[in-house]
Image (cartoon, rainbow, N blue to C red):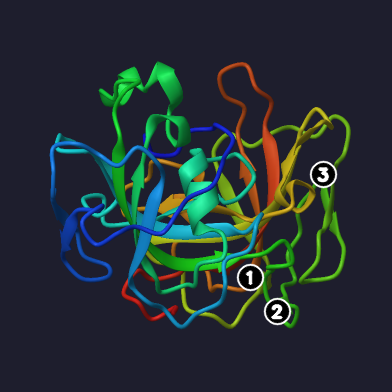
Amino acid sequence: MLALAVIAGCGGSSPKKSDLPTVAGSFGSKPSFTFPTKTAPPTLKSTVLRAGKGAVVAKGDLLVADYLGQVWGGKVFDNSYDRKVPTGFVIGTGKVIPGWDSVLVGKKIGDRVLMSIPPADGYGAQGNSQAGILGTDTLVFVVDLVASYGPSAAGDSKAVRQPVKTPGVTVRGALGAAPTVTVAKGTKGPAKAKVTVLAKGSGQPVATGVLVLQYVAVGYDGQSAGSTWKDGAPSAFPVSDTPTTPFDALRGVPLGSRVLLQLPAASGHPAIAVVADLVAEPKDDGSNG
């Protein structure tokens, strides 16, 4: 997602009526802009086009959103609406462009937000050549805030543990909290990806869309391969009908479940054991806020 650059942030201001473009389209639908002038505002501007009633977005949350980005008076360079699935990113900690961090923290789920972002609050003087953005371009975004998740988001603490065996891989810990995952020395990695439901949740089956989960990953060499619990926020991954990522294999597993996903070695990396709690699959139809 080209819109999500990793630069640190600064502040914004309330717009005058003529400062920002007019936006056509409703929450959850692809917007279009009509620009009031050829000259963009010199400072960061934002306004809420549609007020939501959901939770307030906090610094460090995983924010799930739809968005469209366009150069002021120029081309659309990226949007999630055509992909028909929202995206997830940690907000307020420098993981996205500064204007997003500044404006979106404190907004409510269900808000549709319009932003005009000058270079200093976007990609800086270097621009973004991959997206065709110059270092002098002001960017305009509409962002629909679909859902947000804090560091304690987890699977179902009352999920039903399943009578399964996972030779060489030991998983300990209470449901709804970070597990401990150990791969016994000498354990042979799987030849192909394998999903084992360790505890079955009571939510809807995972379908196509964006899946929010917490996970702990350990290589078959015994080394850590990452943990959202340690990172301080869950992650979001797209799930599709056609297998493109390991998480596509989770289709049909009930939300709230804890699963073991065993992945074969690839590209010089060891096999990996991932224990994931399936937190949620938010919808971009406004039902979350």
Can see residue 139? yes
Distance from the alpha carbon under mark 2 to that under mark 3: 23 Å
Q: Whole-Å distance between the Cαs marked 1 and 3?
A: 21 Å
Say if residue 89 shows up in the picture. no
Circle 3: residue type: Gly
Q: Disc 1 marks which residue?
A: 257
Give the image location of residue 194, x and y in percent: 58, 48
Drawn side of residue 265 relative to residue 53, left or right: right
Q: Are marks 2 and 1 in contact (CB under 8 Å)?
A: yes
Who's the residue at 85% across and 29% down the image?
A: 186
For the point 50% across and 57% down, the residue is: 104
Q: In the image, is residue 134 above or below residue 274?
A: above
Asked if residue 185 lies left or right of residue 199, the reply is right
In percent of width and height, residue 278 lies at 60, 65
Work out whether residue 201 or residue 64 is closer to the camera in this orientation and state it.
64
Check disc 1 and report its element: helix, strand or loop.
loop
Q: Which residue is mark 3?
A: 168
Q: Relative to 227, is 111 above or below? A: below
Residue depicted at x 67% and y 64%: 150
What is the CA distance from the residue labelled 2 to the residue labelled 1? 6 Å
| Residue 180: image location, x then y, percent | 86, 53
Q: Position of residue 138 (x, y in %)?
A: 30, 34
- Disc 1 or 3, which lies upstream in sequence? 3
User: In the rendered structure, which disc, 2 or 1, sits on the residue that comes first in sequence?
Assistant: 2
Q: Mark 2 — residue?
A: 159
| Front: mark 1 or 3 | 1
Choose mark 2 or mark 3, whichever is in front: 2
The residue under label 2 is which amino acid type?
Answer: Ala
